[in-house]
Amino acid sequence: MRRFASLFVILIAAPLMAFGPADRTASTHWALVIGITDYIEFDDVEGGDLPGAEHDARGVRDVLVMGKGFPEENVKMLLNQDATRAAIESGITDWLVTNARPGDNVVIFFAGHGSQMWDESGDEPDGLDETLAPADVSPTSTEFDISDDTFNEWLSMLPAGNVLVILDNCNSGTGTRSVTPFSRGRLLGRDVNGIEKPATVSRRALPGQDDESGFDADGARVLELAAAEPFQQAVDAFFPAEDGAEPFHGGAFTTYLVRELWRAPADASYEDAFDRAYEALKRNRFQQDPQLSEDVGMKDLPLFFVEGADGDAIDGAIPIMSVSGSSAELAGGMALGLTRGSLLETEAGARLVVEAVGQRTTSVSIASGSVSEGDRARLTAFRYSTAPLLVNLGSADSEAIAALRSALGDDTGVRLIEDENTFSHLIIRRQGQETRIVGSDGFIRHDGLPIGAEAGQALAEALQREAAAKRLADMDNPGQRFGVDLEISGGMTDLGLGETLTFTVRSERAGYVTLVDLGTDGTVAMLIPNGDQPSLRIEAGRSLTYPSSDSGVELMALEPAGRGMVRVFVTAEPLGIRIGDGETYAYGGAEFAQVVTEAVKQVVGSQDGAVRIDSWATASIVYDIHN
């Protein structure tokens, strides 16, 4: 087990207020931020320690303090071996209860393992309570677990009714992941069935029935954001080094949530930020389904809103932490998702160029103008990655590998890697008499593929489909200035074969619509514009539906079953992609995804090799077609 020197553990030991809560006249923000990478009683192996949890906690702290105006002294950190059950209980029932008051905003963040324990209260259908695993959790008992019932009791003591709980852990769902070097599930490596069951336990679920009760915070007073559904695994993932950024481990959900919190405008709601993080998670092919409390009105409030709050929320701008000559350091680091060569501008017009992205800060050169510590900069142009899809050959048999290389030919969108410990987006593995493609998160993307020489073409087609998905996923706008929403048939994402569907687009700004579908068979089709509607403009604040009821066109979910993605772009000018004579739609394979993304870059313009982001916006939906 790796232990951390006290130098790297942030503890707020000094008094946290110069005056008591009764003396305050303005509401304010409070946060208890917990991240457990190092578990005291568990070795650093699968099911034990988590490399990304401490990183998550520090990222949350940074965006709250530097991005959302939380007073630094009002954020308490509990990291690693300091995050014991007693310390977490004290943080909520003593520190928060003593300092917070009605009207304040309270945030509790937990990144670490979850588990289960036998339920003695009779309120769980499966006879199991969901638990949070503090740093001193035991491998052989549940003495130090924090059950959902206990956690809710602690929350009920808070005087504030404006409470946000973010949980990046999981409590079940071990059966569908394959072990990879690049991710771990956030489920404690302990079998509750090996722990003595109290006589008071009554299992009300049928044998084999999944527990879907979840870790449900006090819904009447608390808004909960959870990293996964109760029966799923939340993933601690590896994010590779690309475009001048350092590699890091982090919770998949927290990584995208923190990124969206940095980018969110001041009037964005909790649900807005959650939806953007959910969309990014799915677009990047993670399997877990984050959850947002549905019956809590607080989800519609602006992020971290309190009337007359201390601090100064930042509207999508990034603080400059230090300046030295012609270079400066920005807050946020890897959480921002910036790339080397991206451009920013300050409110005074100084232009900055990203040179390197570190763990918690971003290094920039000052290309023009002057800047000072405390200034804020806004992203104006983004340099998109040209990295191919990385595919590890894993345990595929030699004949399958040779056939795959032949089938791919000179395809530059897919790069094959032989060393299984080198990061890859996908891993090919032989399992008995079939070949599988596994994501870096450990979940199976494709199975039932042939083995030997017959595997080549099937593998190539699946990988080219994944490469197309990556191209479309990467074409996000990290600083878009207006909102665009995309919806399938009233909000559906699970479609049955033969089911008819429509797409509805809404935009806050007028522009031309391009709607692209990556089908389950790998075909990339541009649905809008098309042969009947060579350009389709949407007006500001309006919506359009395709196909319309009077168009004479019907779209249907067709074979094969599987996962697809649809993406919409709203641009100031049409993309100008040619549709073949007599064709209704322009379409193709993975190469057509590149045609679309290059057309977007061309029409929106560039500056010093980086794509401008101010005149366009995008949204996407991942859908599943079932037999």
Image: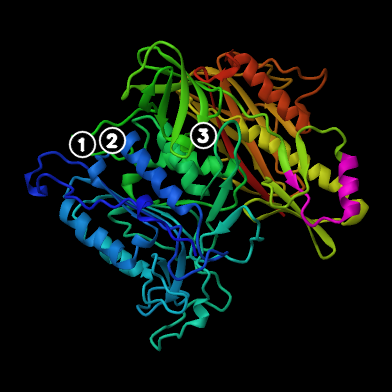
- Kindly identify which numbered label has been placed on residue 69: 2
Q: Element type at marker 3? A: loop
**Separation (CA) of disc 3 from disc 1:** 28 Å
Q: Residue at x 83, y 60 (%)?
A: 434
Given the image, on which type of amino acid does mark 2 rest?
Gly
Given the image, on which type of amino acid does mark 1 rest?
Ala
Q: Which residue is mark 1?
A: 309
Q: Which percent across, then down, holds residue 84? A: 34, 65
Q: Give the crowd class for mark 2: few <14, some 14-19, many >=20 residues within 10 Å.
A: some
**Separation (CA) of disc 1 from disc 2:** 9 Å
Q: Looking at this rendering, what residue extends furthest in the bottom direction?
A: 199
Between circles 3 and 1, the one closer to the viewer is: 3
Judged left or right of residue 399, residue 167 is left
The first of marks 1 and 2 along the sequence is 2
Q: Which of the pair 389/600 is nearer the observer?
A: 389
Q: Which residue is mark 3?
A: 337
**Separation (CA) of disc 3 from disc 2:** 21 Å
State which region is magenta.
391-407
Circles 3 and 2, Cβ within 8 Å, touching? The answer is: no
